[in-house]
Structures are given as structure tokens and as C-alpha cells.
Image (tube, rainbow, N blue to C red):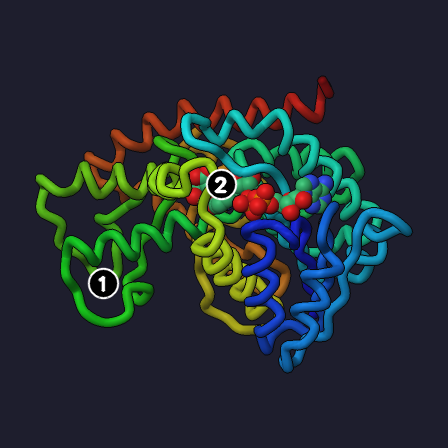
Amino acid sequence: MKAVVAGAAGGIGQPLSLLLKASPHVDHLSLYDVVNTPGVTADLSHISSVATIDGFLPADDGLKKAFTGADIVVIPAGIPRKPGMTRDDLFKINAGIVKGLIEGIVQHCPDAFILVISNPVNSTVPIAAEVLKKAGKFNPKKLFGVTTLDVVRAETFVREITGAKGDPSKTVIPVIGGHSGETIVPLFSQASPSVSIPQDKLDALTNRVQFGGDEVVKAKDGAGSATLSMAYAGFRFAEKVIRAAKGETGIVEPSFIYLAGVEGGEAVAKETGCEYFSVPVELGKDGAQKAHNIVTSANDYEKKLLQACYAGLKGNITKGVEFVANPP
Ligand code: NAD
Ligand code: LMR
């Protein structure tokens, strides 16, 4: 299992690479970034874990060397937000970065699982899909927008209200839709085991999950956005994809996918009117095996949230598709 991190020297890239280097599920880790990859690689190479490691800058065919033979490429490359910015404000720069990296994947490892972390995820995933489609290399089962941080936040924040003891990650809370503000829709009514949230606390809890990213951006005060919690979330999702690829069954995690190519996805697309949507996805050897149409189970409160989600998400998706169809 060869894993690649593209954007490996960044705030997310470094701790994410650390977690992948330490994972017993990874045999080889290749790091790629436009700066500082040699230092990060040398540092991680001293860790006595299973995975071997190498790292590359763009010079001397670095991208080709990093990507060739990859089974999974995780992409946290791109600029993060500063206070006052929306994720959409990152589009101008990150759209081109993601497009370039996906073109590299097309050339050097078109069969790899691709996990897109770079924001705005609602648009960068459609960009990735369009580039792959154009090249005739699109496999919807292998392209994932990473929305796990929203799930992790919901698991954490709900406990502050319920006061439940034990491991918070054992309470499964589907968070669906997209990955920005109102497009993020936590379905607390579908938690398993069920959670009891007083009605007067539900608005604040929902809002905190939807705008959890802003909380970190504000606290970092100009020094970027979530990196450590994102590395944890990105690793959690990547490891699940890897474990499923190795044959483990019964793994389900929400992810932002192109619905038409995945079993069960058509029903979600029909329900939501969106081509891409994050829903709980059953992972298998070949990637996204089945999309769970949990949208129909939402209660009335959540259905209202979903209406706002659809409107925002459709615009974000179209923007990504347009970027590849009519390059600026
Ligand atoms: P950062 O600036 O600390 O790191 C980004 C890294 O990408 C840098 O090292 C930079 O050199 C590298 N990079 C830029 N262009 C590149 C290219 N063409 N090829 C390879 N590497 C390249 O930023 P960060 O805090 O790590 O955030 C990265 C991205 O992740 C941002 O867009 C941020 O908004 C996003 N993010 C997403 C989520 C999510 O839930 N999906 C959560 C947090 C952050
Ligand atoms: C997050 O949710 O923390 C990330 O998408 C980063 C951001 O810009 O908020």
C-alpha cells in the first residue's frame, strides 16, 4: 500500500504524514510539496514504523516520482482561510492547485484512491472529477471529498451537551451535504446510539458543527485554519479507505462523492437535486461501494436545513465544473 500526501509540508500535511508514517496499514509513504519536502521527509524517516518513506519537490520529475505506483493520494495542498474569508474565497488559488495535482494523478497513478481535503471541497471535488472525466480516467468509486472533520466535530460537540461518558467516536452521527457553513447538515436524529438534545440547545449545536471551522480560524487569528484536527480526521478517513481496500468489510463513513457512479447514489441525487453530496458511504475493496440514502430519514428540523444546503451546494458544484469546462 503506497500512500502519497500532496501538500505534505503544510499545516495539515505534516501531522497527516506523521500519522500515515506510523500506520501499520501503509507500506510506503511518498511526500510531495512545492517547498520543504526534504526536511519533513528526513524527520519522519527516523521513525521506526513499518512504512518506508521518500519525499519530492517539483524539480527533477518529483511529482512523477512521488505519484507513480500510488494506491492512495491524499491532497491537503492549497491555501487556508484567514479571519473574514469564506472557503469560497480560496477558490481562485486552490482550484488551479487541485487541477494540476489531479492532472498529475491522471498521468502517473490514475487508479489511485483520491482524497481531496483542499478547500472549497464543494468545488474542488467537482474540479477533480471533471479533469478525470476529460482524460477518460474517472472512477467515481475512487474519488472522495473529505468531510470527516465535520463528523468528528459533531461527535465531540454533542458530548458537551449530553455529558455521555466513554469514547465519543463510538456515537455515530451522520453529517451530510457539503463542507461549508449551511451546506453542512448534521443529522442528530439519526445518531446511533440515539442522543437526546434539548430543543433549546439544538440550534446552537447545529450552528457550531456548521461553523466549527470559523471557530478555529478566529482562534488562530491569521495563522491559518484547522490543521491538527483535520490531520486526525483525514487520517481516520484515509485509514478506513485503506482497510476496506485490503478486504475489511462493514466500514461506513460519510464522504462527498459523485453520486451517479456509486450504488444507491442515484436515489440521493434524485432526492437532493445535487450531483455530488456527502452521505454515509460503505467502503469496499474498490472504494465507494454503496451510498446510504439517509436524506429521507431526516426529521422536519433537518429537512429545513437541507433546503438551505441544496441551494448553496448546487452553486459551488457548478462553479467547479465550469472552471474545468471554461478555464479562466
Ligand atoms: P498550509 O498553507 O499550511 O499548507 C498547504 C501546503 O500546500 C503548503 O505546504 C504548500 O506549499 C502546499 N502546496 C501549495 N501548492 C502546492 C502544489 N501545487 N503541490 C503540492 N503542494 C502544494 O495549509 P493547510 O492549513 O495545511 O490547509 C490546506 C488546505 O486544506 C486548505 O485549502 C484548507 O482550507 C483545507 N482544509 C480542509 C479541511 C476539510 O475539512 N476538508 C479542513 C482544514 C483545512
Ligand atoms: C474546517 O472546517 O476547519 C476547514 O474547512 C478549514 C476552514 O477553512 O474552516
Are circles 2 and 1 on residues that touch, CB within 8 Å?
no
The image quadrant where one finds the N terminus is: bottom right
Q: Report helix, strand or loop for mark 1.
A: loop
Comparing marks 2 and 1, which lies closer to the viewer? 2
Asked if the residue at label 1 sits under 8 Å from ligand 1, the reply is: no
Residue named by callout 1: 193
Q: Report helix, strand or loop for mark 2.
A: loop
With 298 as the anchor, is 268 left or right in this view? right
Can see residue 217? yes
Image quadrant where residue 211 sits: top left
* Residue 112, above or below 169: above
Q: Within 10 Å of the Cα at label 2, are there few (<14), some (14-19), or many (20+) other Cα atoms? A: some
The image quadrant where one finds the C terminus is: top right
Which amino acid is tagged 2? Gly
Rendered location of residue 227, percent (x, y): 49, 51
Which amino acid is tagged 1? Pro
Asked if the residue at label 2 sits under 8 Å from ligand 1, the reply is: yes
Rendered location of residue 238, percent (x, y): 56, 60
Mark 2 to mark 1: distance in Å? 35 Å
Rendered location of residue 45, percent (x, y): 70, 72
With 300 as the anchor, is 293 left or right in this view? right
Residue located at (69% from left, 59% from top): 4
Q: 286 or 6: which is nearer to us? A: 6
Residue located at (18% from left, 69% from top): 165
Residue located at (33% from left, 64% from top): 169
Residue 224, label in figure: 2
Q: Within 10 Å of the Cα at label 1, are there few (<14), some (14-19), or many (20+) other Cα atoms? A: few
Q: Residue furthest right?
A: 60
Quadrant location of ligand 1? top right
Can see residue 140? no
Q: 44 or 168: which is nearer to us? A: 44
Rendered location of residue 318, percent (x, y): 56, 23
